[in-house]
Amino acid sequence: SQQGEEDPQALSIQEGENATMNCSYKTSINNLQWYRQNSGRGLVHLILIRSNEREKHSGRLRVTLDTSKKSSSLLITASRAADTASYFCATDANSGNTPLVFGKGTRLSVIA
Amino acid sequence: NAGVMQNPRHLVRRRGQEARLRCSPMKGHSHVYWYRQLPEEGLKFMVYLQKENIIDESGMPKERFSAEFPKEGPSILRIQQVVRGDSAAYFCASSPRTGNTGELFFGEGSRLTVL
């Protein structure tokens, strides 16, 4: 079963607005990552946040992690039409050499 | 620096045929992962390989699917006797480090259509 579940499944906003996507997971983790996928393309890594971190920034991206609630959020500020894509969270189980497990993603549409 | 290279990008097979998907990891990366993505779905882990070794194949169907990463050459995901349900995008990712402590670098995927 999926480890991470993103919410909402789809999000449509106007250019310039902020977009917030959430991810919940089930087991303890070492780190949580967010990836972006443009239609028909491969995934591109956006940001990684470790389990001992609470917030991280990268350009217009802000990621938070709440390990007590087993949840993370990705905020994209001042969105642009080029931000239109699917966004996935990925987690690694905090036990052994397990692969990244991806959620089903949030499809973001930014309307110009 | 070339990224992860996958080919073919698109593959059409009839039921019962074989599909072979190839993946060349980024230079210097010795860890390869294969994921499958159905339309409007997330990625499902299939198999994790290092050179000449299968480390974790817990996500791979027991029959018809196999993967290898030989000492020389690309990693191969092989699907024998394909069925319509195998139609999906298959993504390869590589990393330089053991397991999951860092980011994965993905290829553009191979899209398999089974007629």
Image: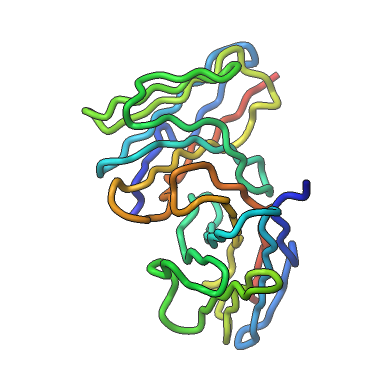
- Give above or below for A11 relative to B81: above
Q: Residue furthest left?
A: A68
Q: Position of residue B68 (x, y in %)?
A: 57, 75
Q: Position of residue A51 (x, y in %)?
A: 33, 31
The residue under the point 45% across, 23% down is A63
Q: Position of residue A62 (x, y in %)?
A: 49, 19
Looking at the rendering, in which quadrant would you find the C terminus of chain B?
Answer: bottom right
Task: Please say which color scheme the image uses.
Answer: rainbow
The residue under the point 66% across, 40% down is A38
Task: Give the left or right position of residue A93, taking residue B67 as reference.
Answer: left
Task: Give the left or right position of residue B83, taking residue B108 as reference.
Answer: left
The quadrant holding residue B9 is: bottom right
Q: Residue furthest right?
A: B1
- Give above or below for A15 relative to A9: above
**Across the whole image, how many numbered discs are drawn on residues?**
0
Task: Give the left or right position of residue B17, taking residue A77 as reference.
Answer: right
- Give above or below for B65 relative to A38: below
Q: Position of residue A25 (x, y in %)?
A: 31, 40
The quadrant holding residue A109 is: top right
The residue under the point 65% across, 78% down is B19
Report the front residue among B38 and A90: A90
The residue under the point 60% across, 78% down is B78
